[in-house]
Every structure is written in C-alpha cells, then in structure tokens.
Image (cartoon, grey):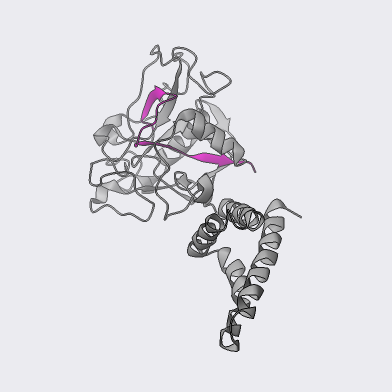
C-alpha cells in the first residue's frame, strides 16, 4: 500500500472514531452527520477547501490528540502533492542537443499546508525563499529544482510556437512576457488576469500543454547543470559554447524574449534565476537570466520543480 493510501486509511479510521464520539453525545437529530468523515475523504481528493479544513483540524488537535493530528497531517500532505498540476515538456533541441522530455509544474510552486509544495491556479508563488531552502524542500518532496538545461528547453519550445507571439507567427510581434509592467503589487496566483493584454501569463508547448509564468510574475531559482558545481551553483565564467549564453537560437530581448549575460561573465558562487517578476519591465522574458546570492530571500524570487517520471 502506498504512503498516500496508508495515510488516508489512517485518517478514515480516526475521523470515523471522531464522528462516532460526536454522535453519541448528541440526540438522533444529528445522526445524518455519521457520513461526514466519508464525505470529507472523498471530497478531499479534489476540493482544496476540504484539504484546508482538514489541515486546520490537524493543527487544532495537535496537543490533545497528537496521533490523530499526525495522521491527518500526513494525509493532507500526501493528497496535496498528488493533486499538483504538472505538464510534460517534450524532447526539445537546445544548443544542438536534445533535452529529454520531463514533467514540470504548470505553475510556480506555492506554499501549501505544513510547508508542502502546492502547484495549482489558486496558490500564489512561494517566494522569499533561499536557493538552499527551495532545493531542500524540493528534494524532501520527491521533486527537484528546474535545471538550466530544462529551463532552456522550455524557453526554446515556447519560442517556436506561433501562438506564443503577439503577431500570431514566430518572429511576428513579441513573445508574451507575463506580469512584468507593475500592474500588480506582488506575485499573483494563476487565476489572476492582467487588464493589459500584453501581459498574458501562459505559453503553449509543442505538445499542446500550457505552462504559466515562465516569464514574469516571479523569478524561479535554477539548478545550474551547465556551468555549475554539484550543488547547482555557478562555478565559473560562462564559456563561449555554453547554451546559457548562446544566442543562435534566441531572439533579441527587444522581441520580448528577455535578456541575459554574455560569454565570459562570471557569476561564480551565485545561483541562476530566470524569467523576471511583476515589475521587471521589458527585460522580462522566457530567456531572461540573472543570478543571486544563494542565502538571500527576496519577495520576487520563487521556484519551479520537476517530478520524476
């Protein structure tokens, strides 16, 4: 039995006991509540409000009933991770090599109950988090930070789709840049829509899947697997043959693709961040790249994860 299933079975038993105790203390007019536990468990599979209520209940009973609280907590975490919205990025050529297909969050990671990674349209990006913490939390959740090669694969794939250009054809107009004009006061959940048409937040991949906030809203920490060390930190100047600085397949940032460093620039000891944020202005874009101190936290920097399989 999976950990998720075990947690839900445990939660089922605990809620049945709780419901039974409550019913025995009330008159028969309250007997319809006997099915409450079962309904909660069924609805929790798809209803975020039920999960939030169960999480609050786990916190409330933590002192009086720690075993019950722990079981509910585990079930909520497992269900939250299971419900995360993911998309598949297909095999994509980057710098003359194929980046194999991978699964990635359709949105930037949000902070769910019990500091669980929650990826959905309703949760605002989890920002003010350091590179180290984003990396650690990703690993603890069975996920991984988006790598530099994967980020480039997403950007290259987006760039080659006509629907992602304001003119309806590749190279016509500008690539949509997401939230970047300062029309909001902080990172927004996926359901937020800008009143400015040029701030469209979603891009379509070559397989028809839709990914959000690759450009704008909030930066995402990147694990550098191109010129980085074993920890994903930039380890030296960008080589001339690095796909990170190779502009052969990229459009100028003036077309909305974003700007970045040139060969020879040295961000050693820092971690890469990509995309831009809600007030980056015209430099925001799917290829936009900066670097930041790994220990610092900023309200405009979040993270995106990939999932095995």
**Which is more toward the observer, 293 or 196?**
293
The picture places residue 162, in percent across and down from the top left corner, at 38, 46
Q: Is residue 287 left or right of residue 305?
A: left
Q: Is residue 284 left or right of residue 245?
A: left
Question: Is residue 125 in view?
Answer: yes
Q: Residue visible at 65% across and 73% down?
A: 21
Q: Is 26 within the magenta?
A: no
The picture places residue 124, in percent across and down from the top left corner, at 39, 49
Q: Residue visible at 43% across and 36% down?
A: 155
The picture places residue 42, in percent across and down from the top left corner, at 61, 69
Residue ranking furthest to the right = 1
Q: Is residue 108 left or right of residue 167?
A: right
Q: Residue visible at 27% across and 41% down?
A: 173
From which residue to which does the magenta span run? Answer: 287-309
Question: Is residue 249 in view?
Answer: no
**Which is more toward the observer, 113 or 34?**
34
**Which is more toward the observer, 233 or 283?**
233
The quarter of the displayed image where residue 280 is located: top left
Residue ranking furthest to the bottom = 29
Q: How many marks?
A: 0
* Quarter of the image with the N terminus in it: bottom right
**Which is more toward the observer, 270 or 215?**
270
* Quarter of the image with the C terminus in it: top right
The picture places residue 71, in percent across and down from the top left corner, at 65, 55
Q: Is 303 within the magenta?
A: yes
């Amino acid at each position: 039995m999976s950990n998720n299933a075990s947690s839900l079975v445990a939660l089922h038993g605990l809620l049945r006991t709780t419901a039974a105790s409550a019913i025995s203390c009330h008159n028969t007019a309250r007997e319809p509540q006997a099915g409450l536990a079962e309904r909660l468990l069924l609805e929790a599979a798809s209803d975020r409000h039920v999960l939030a209520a169960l999480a609050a209940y786990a916190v409330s009973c933590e002192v009086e009933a720690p075993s019950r609280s722990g079981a509910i907590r585990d079930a909520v975490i497992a269900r939250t991770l299971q419900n995360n919205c993911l998309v598949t990025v297909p095999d994509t050529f980057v710098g003359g090599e194929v980046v194999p297909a991978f699964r990635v969050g359709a949105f930037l990671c949000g902070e769910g109950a019990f500091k669980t990674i929650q990826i959905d349209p309703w949760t605002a990006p989890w920002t003010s988090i350091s590179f180290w913490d984003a990396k650690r939390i990703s690993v603890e959740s069975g996920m991984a930070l988006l790598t530099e090669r994967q980020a480039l694969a997403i950007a290259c794939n987006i760039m080659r789709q006509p629907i992602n250009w304001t003119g309806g054809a590749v190279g016509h107009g500008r690539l949509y840049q997401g939230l970047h004009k300062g029309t909001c006061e902080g990172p927004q959940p996926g359901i937020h829509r800008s009143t400015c048409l040029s701030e469209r937040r979603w891009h379509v991949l070559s397989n028809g899947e839709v990914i959000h906030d690759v450009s704008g809203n909030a930066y995402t920490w990147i694990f550098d697997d191109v010129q980085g060390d074993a920890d994903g930190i930039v380890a030296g100047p960008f080589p001339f043959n690095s796909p990170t600085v190779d502009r052969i397949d990229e459009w100028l940032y003036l077309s909305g693709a974003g700007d970045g460093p040139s060969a020879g620039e040295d961000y050693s000891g820092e971690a890469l961040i990509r995309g831009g944020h809600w007030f980056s202005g015209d430099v925001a874009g799917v290829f936009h790249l900066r670097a930041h101190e790994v220990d610092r936290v900023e309200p405009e920097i979040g993270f995106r994860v990939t999932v095995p399989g």
